Amino acid sequence: MNQHSSNLRSSWLNRTTLGIGLTSLFSDWSHEIATTILPMFLASLGAGPGWLGAIEGTADGLSSFSKLVAGHYTDRLQHRKPLVQTGYLVTTLATGALALATSAWQVLAARTTAWLGRGIRTPGRKALLASAISPEAYGRAFGFERMMDTIGAIVGPITALWLLQRNSHNYHRVLAWTLLPGIMAVLTFGLLVREISSHQPAIGSFWLAVRQLPGSFRRFLLAVGIFGLGDFSHTLLILFATLVLAPS
């Protein structure tokens, strides 16, 4: 490892860690604005709860499978940063495109495209963060990134409600505002994150890589997978809360 790489990894809160943390904050801020008003937006288009379930199920499923494919693919790249930044750009533009939607089919297309970009960027982002710090600092660095992401998840709904009031409940205008934090995420990632291209690209098939994993880790993945099967989209909770708190 060269001197630049050693300096970059000397502190866990370095330029790359901060950049990835801020990127997560801005990106989550952006799409949480859309997620907060998505049930109400679909209702304004005449689409019922069935459409919400279909849209979120399709988007989440595509995102999950794209993470699997992207994780396998990015391990074979010498430079991961361009692919990750492209994923953030796709998510930003597709989320902003919801502002142009006039039917549930268009919402489906925009949402699934946004979540496809989200799935593509995730494995590479985690690999970039891991390569920028020493192994003993993984907990602090990844915890910081998750904290920033959670802050975005808190600020996003608050921003959405404020924008709804400021724009007389015009959902299209509110969705257009998602472009601002989304673009900030893309720019922050591009300007602050530095990639250490010291890893050797992986070779071999996907199943060979899985077989080489420790048995205890494969059992852990199985447990996480079973847990994930019982998960559901949080937008359904938003719809339920909306119906209970404001039946009209």
Image (cartoon, grey):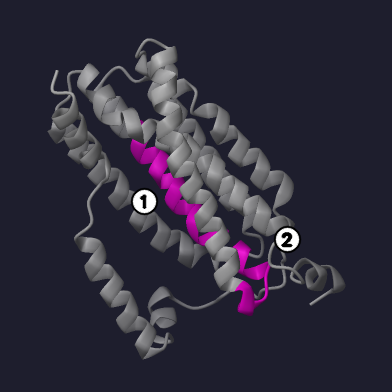
Farthest right residue? 3
Residue in view at x 43 percent, y 25 percent: 97
Q: How crowded is mark 2: few (under 14 residues within 10 Å), some or many (20 or more)?
A: some
Residue in view at x 61 percent, y 69 percent: 130
Q: In which quarter of the image is the C terminus?
A: top left
Residue 9 in the image: above or below residue 21: below
Farthest bottom residue? 215
What's the residue type where badge 2 is placed? Asn
Residue in view at x 72 percent, y 67 percent: 197
Residue 96 location, x and y as percent? 46, 27
Q: Residue 14 carries which label?
A: 2
Which is nearer the N-term, disc 2 or disc 1? 2
Q: What stretch is highlighted in magenta?
A: 110-137
Residue 225 in the image: above or below residue 195: below
**Residue carrying label 1:** 63
- Please check the rendered image and state whether residue 74 is part of the magenta-colored stretch, yes or no: no
Residue 166 location, x and y as percent? 44, 13
- Please check the rendered image and state whether residue 118 is part of the magenta-colored stretch, yes or no: yes
Residue 74 in the image: above or below residue 239: below
Q: Residues within 10 Å of mark 1 (few under 14, many from 20)?
A: many
Element at badge 2? Answer: loop
Is residue 200 rendered to the left or right of residue 33?
Answer: right
Q: In front here: 202 or 29? A: 29
Residue in view at x 28 percent, y 52 percent: 61
Q: Can residue 34 be seen in this view?
A: yes
